[in-house]
Image (cartoon, rainbow, N blue to C red):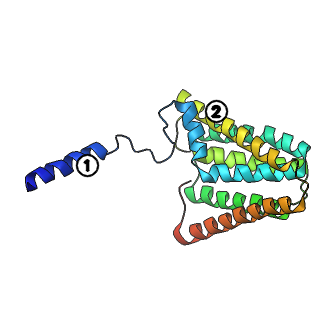
């Protein structure tokens, strides 16, 4: 019986052992385009700030929302392409920059800052370049990785558009305050990430 149990445990371990260990890009099994969409959806460091800047752009009005909608996905694609070109950066620098952009966007949303459209676009461009670069760091310039990047860019476009559409028509003060509270949570996450980096070093993003 003991021998049979050992064989059963060994067989179970072999069956449950993953064939591929991928610590960065998500593999959905549906192709590289869907891999990019899935990666964005399962990466809170990507999706949360996109939602936040969408909410902020919506509060600033249709002109800002349209401009950022054009800039953010494009910057994401540019950042990813730079990474696919072989450019690298220290992990701690990427993590620190992510914490800083969380704090910035969260602070802008929490304060409902009267930022001009081009200022909002500059913040969006910084976010897109940073996170697009971080997502594809270490990947090679191949057709599947380019398709993955396109999937991410499409996800950024859709999620931002939906988030901005939620705040564009808001008039009631309590609704605007509720959205601004969400910005304070994002800023708190950025502060928490900064503290983590200070205490434990870079976080893989």
Q: Are marks 2 and 1 in contact (CB under 8 Å)?
A: no
Residue indicated by mark 2: 150
Please indicate, yes or no, whether residue 145 appears anywhere in the rendered image: no
Q: Position of residue 51 (x, y in %)?
A: 72, 50
Residue 63 found in image quarter: top right
- Does 201 appear above or below 101? below
Q: Residue at x 58, y 60 (%)?
A: 92
Quarter the N terminus occupies: bottom left
Q: Position of residue 76 (x, y in %)?
A: 69, 41
- C-alpha separation, residue under disc 2 versus residue under disc 1: 37 Å
Q: Residue at x 87, y 60 (%)?
A: 113
Which residue lies most toward the top here?
143
Q: Position of residue 93 (x, y in %)?
A: 61, 58
- Does 147 appear above or below 168? above
Residue 66 found in image quarter: top right
State the SS at label 1: helix
Left or right position of 22 against 136: left
State the SS at label 2: helix
Say whether disc 2 or disc 1 marks the residue closer to the N-terminus: 1
- Does 182 appear above or below 77? below
- Does 7 appear above or below 30? below
Q: How many marks?
A: 2
Number of residues whose C-alpha sits closer than 10 Å to that of mark 2, classed few (under 14), some (14–19) or many (20 or more): many
Residue 102 found in image quarter: bottom right
- Asked whether 176 or 65 is in front, the reply is 176
Please indicate, yes or no, whether residue 185 appears anywhere in the rendered image: yes
- Asked whether 135 or 90 is in front, the reply is 135
Residue 152, labelled with which disc? none
Q: Position of residue 2 (x, y in %)?
A: 9, 56
Q: Residue at x 53, y 55 (%)?
A: 204
Left or right position of 83 against 108: left
Residue indicated by mark 1: 13
């Amino acid at each position: 019986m003991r021998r049979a149990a050992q064989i059963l445990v060994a067989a179970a371990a072999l069956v449950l052992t993953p064939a591929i260990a991928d610590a960065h890009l998500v593999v959905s099994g549906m192709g590289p385009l869907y891999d990019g969409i899935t990666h964005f959806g399962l990466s809170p460091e990507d999706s949360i700030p996109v939602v936040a800047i969408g909410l902020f752009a919506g509060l600033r009005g249709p002109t800002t929302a349209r401009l950022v909608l054009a800039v953010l996905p494009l910057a994401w694609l540019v950042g990813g392409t730079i990474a696919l070109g072989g450019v690298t950066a220290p992990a701690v620098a990427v993590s620190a920059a992510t914490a800083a952009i969380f704090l910035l966007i969260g602070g802008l949303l929490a304060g409902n800052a009267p930022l001009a459209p081009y200022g909002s676009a500059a913040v969006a461009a910084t976010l897109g370049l940073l996170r697009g670069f971080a997502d594809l760091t270490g990947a090679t310039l191949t057709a599947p990785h380019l398709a993955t990047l396109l999937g991410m860019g499409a996800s950024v476009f859709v999620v931002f558009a939906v988030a901005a559409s939620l705040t564009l028509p808001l008039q009631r003060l309590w609704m605007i305050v509720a959205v601004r509270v969400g910005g304070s949570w994002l800023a708190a996450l950025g502060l928490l990430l900064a503290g983590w980096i200070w205490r434990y070093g870079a976080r893989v993003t």
